Image (spheres, rainbow, N blue to C red):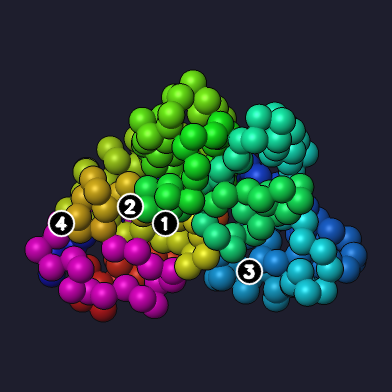
Amino acid sequence: MKDLRIEIDDKSGFCFGVVRAISEAEKALAGGETVYSLGDIVHNRIEVQRLEKLGPSTVTHADMPRLTGRRPCLQARVVKAHERMRPAGGQVVILGKRGHAEVVGLTGQVPDRTIVVEGEEDLSQIDFTRPVYFLSQTTQSIALFEALGAEMRRRAANPADVHIDDTICRQVSSREQHLQEFARRFDAVVFVCGRKSSNGRVLFEVCRTANPRTCNIEEAAEIDPAWFEGAESVGICGATSTPKWLMQEVADRIGKIGKGK
């Protein structure tokens, strides 16, 4: 196998929210404090394992109430959506993954039912003779959100009764076009993300659509040399929950494969 040209995407890696969360945890630990994380601090098993060696304890919602998904701004929008829909007999619909921490938190804001959809196949849950208020889990695909919003208006008895409120995080969506361009530049692409990462699934599909020779791994040990047969260049990228140091480990491993080690 020829020496591979390997490049790590400089725009991949933690978003500012993850950077802040991990920085605060590390700072507290350095000061001798006891740190508890309600669920994984980031949806990346390898990074969580690194942090656990420093001392934080992970607890679940069985140990204390679920807090994830209760950011004040998005929480308020969900509550206001229900307040707006209630007098008109309308429905609040969220695009998201069932069971995801954010979706669990958001649907628990009010006693009224919130409809969760993951794709067009779930739209049958909606009564299109009634008003609809449509929001999204922050890490969903903009393309999917827009497509479902358009389909809802197409099916609605009155399209004007479908209110679309884009709540998708631009830290994820702003990377989509960049990753399309990045993936097309290489013979093969390795996308690194945790198995639990919702934004990872979205961004991996963006890369795979742009370059069918895109493979998804969680850590360097999963790399298969056969992926790079006939390739001269490999791009490495990741989710907003993927640490730079992990992508570097992947690059180092691929570099050794290219040298026949």
- Residue 184 against residue 2 in the figure, above or below: above
Q: Nearer the viewer, residue 4 or 216?
A: 216
Provide the secondary structure element on which disc 3 rests. helix
Amino acid at the residue labelled 3: Val
Distance CA(mark 3)–CA(mark 2): 24 Å
Is 46 located above or below residue 114 in the figure?
Answer: below
Mark 4 touches mark 1? (CB < 8 Å): no
Q: Which residue is mark 3?
A: 48
Looking at the picture, how far across and down is residue 101, in whole percent? 64, 59
x 49%, y 45%: residue = 126
Residue 205 circle label = 2
Q: Quadrant of the C terminus?
A: bottom left
Q: Amino acid at mark 1?
A: Arg
Q: Are marks 2 and 1 in contact (CB under 8 Å)?
A: yes
Is 15 within the magenta? no
Segment tinted magenta in the rendering = 215-240
How busy is the neighbourhood of tag 4: few (under 14 within 10 Å), some, or many (20 plus)? some
Which dot, 2 or 4, sits closer to the camera? 2
**For mark 4, what is the residue?**
232
Q: Earlier in the sequence, mark 1 or mark 3?
A: 3
